[in-house]
Image (cartoon, rainbow, N blue to C red):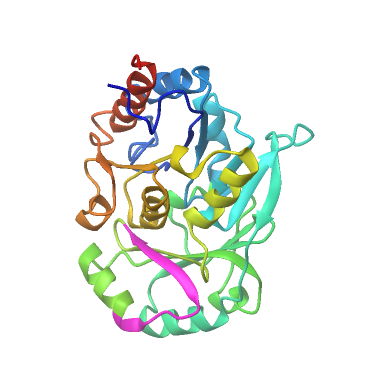
């Protein structure tokens, strides 16, 4: 029996990167490139929705072999669009920003030994300490003091506190009380802060409209707390939200489907399921 959510329709498939498409060493999850190619060849749109900056995303997009019209970065604060005049093939289409002064001052008080990074509106980044996962060697990121980050317009603030466990960090962030911003806590005491009301879902809703895809024809796949917003958005409009097998309970709770872990090729499993359903006879 054909699943009416898929059959005969052009899907918009948005993939998270870390823990979804990518393993910890930045190699690809098993069979993901082949599954993405089959999905694109079947006429569907496959794009990226990541917390990463564009500078830390572009090479992965090209390695996947896809060229969607729009790509969502910085947890929804940045949308890139196809532009063949640019070296990477993309240019900044939309960027949401805010002044991080109040947030940084509050966090610095409670987390004086944490490592801080901000992403400016043009995509350049400032950081207080080097962190391997930030991919700082790929762009012209600049080392600064935290006060140099204040009073600027930024698209994103990232905070890493290595001395805290994930649970301790979640509890601490809740106690601090961050207002007038959107935030999510990731793996290993990692905090992402975005402009108020901005997350992956707000950017993807714009992409969906520009691409002319019905709300019920959206599919999102992810594994982290910063994916909760896009999961609720997709499922709330009749779309599908696949949680990776290793996702936290609160992420799985708002998903519509559960797939394998990133090590098991969960994205490939989910995409193959969609393609099989689409190909099923009516």
* Quadrant into which the N terminus falls: top left
* Residue found 21% across the figure and 66% down from its top: 167
Is 222 displayed left or right of 246 in the figure? Answer: right
Rendered position, 13 above or below 250: above
* Residue found 20% across the figure and 55% down from its top: 249
The residue lying toward the viewer, choosing from 72 and 146, is 72
The residue lying toward the viewer, choosing from 68 and 116, is 68
Extreme-front residue of the structure = 282
* Residue found 32% across the figure and 23% down from its top: 2
Is 159 magenta? The answer is no
The residue lying toward the viewer, choosing from 190 and 258, is 258
* Quadrant into which the C terminus falls: top left
| Segment colored magenta | 175-186
Whether residue 168 appears in this view of the structure is yes
Total number of numbered discs in the rendering:
0
Query: Residue 42 appears at what percent x and percent y?
Result: 49, 18
Is 102 displayed left or right of 254 in the figure? Answer: right
Extreme-right residue of the structure = 85
Rendered position, 241 above or below 233: above
Rendered position, 153 above or below 255: below
Extreme-top residue of the structure = 281
Tell me where residue 241 sits by quadrant: top left
Query: Residue 250 appears at what percent x and percent y?
Result: 24, 58
Query: Residue 30 appears at what percent x and percent y?
Result: 31, 25
Is 181 magenta? The answer is yes
Rendered position, 131 above or below 24: below
Whether residue 14 appears in this view of the structure is no
């Amino acid at each position: 029996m054909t699943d009416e959510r898929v059959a005969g329709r052009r899907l918009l498939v948005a993939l998270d990167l870390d823990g979804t498409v990518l393993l910890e060493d930045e190699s690809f999850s098993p069979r993901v490139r082949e599954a993405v190619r089959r999905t694109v060849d079947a006429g569907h749109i496959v794009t990226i929705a990541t917390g990463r900056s564009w500078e830390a995303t572009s090479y992965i997009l090209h390695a996947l072999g896809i060229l969607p019209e729009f790509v969502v970065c910085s947890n929804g604060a940045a949308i890139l669009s196809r532009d063949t005049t640019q070296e990477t093939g993309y240019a900044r289409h939309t960027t949401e920003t805010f002044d991080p002064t109040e947030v940084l001052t509050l966090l610095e008080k409670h987390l004086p030994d944490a490592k801080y990074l901000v992403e400016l509106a043009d995509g350049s980044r400032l950081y207080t300490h080097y962190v391997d996962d930030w991919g700082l060697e790929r762009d012209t990121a600049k080392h600064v003091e935290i006060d140099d980050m204040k009073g600027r317009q930024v698209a994103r603030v990232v905070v890493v506190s290595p001395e805290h466990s994930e649970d301790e960090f979640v509890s601490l962030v809740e106690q601090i009380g961050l207002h007038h911003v959107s935030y999510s806590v990731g793996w290993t005491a990692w905090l992402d802060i975005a402009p108020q009301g901005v997350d992956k879902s707000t950017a993807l809703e714009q992409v969906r409209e520009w691409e002319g895809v019905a709300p019920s024809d959206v599919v999102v796949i992810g594994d982290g707390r910063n994916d909760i917003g896009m999961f609720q958005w997709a499922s709330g409009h009749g779309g599908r939200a696949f949680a990776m097998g290793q996702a936290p309970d609160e992420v799985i709770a708002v998903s519509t489907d559960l797939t394998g872990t990133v090590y098991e090729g969960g994205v490939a499993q989910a995409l193959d399921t969609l393609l099989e359903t689409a190909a099923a006879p009516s």
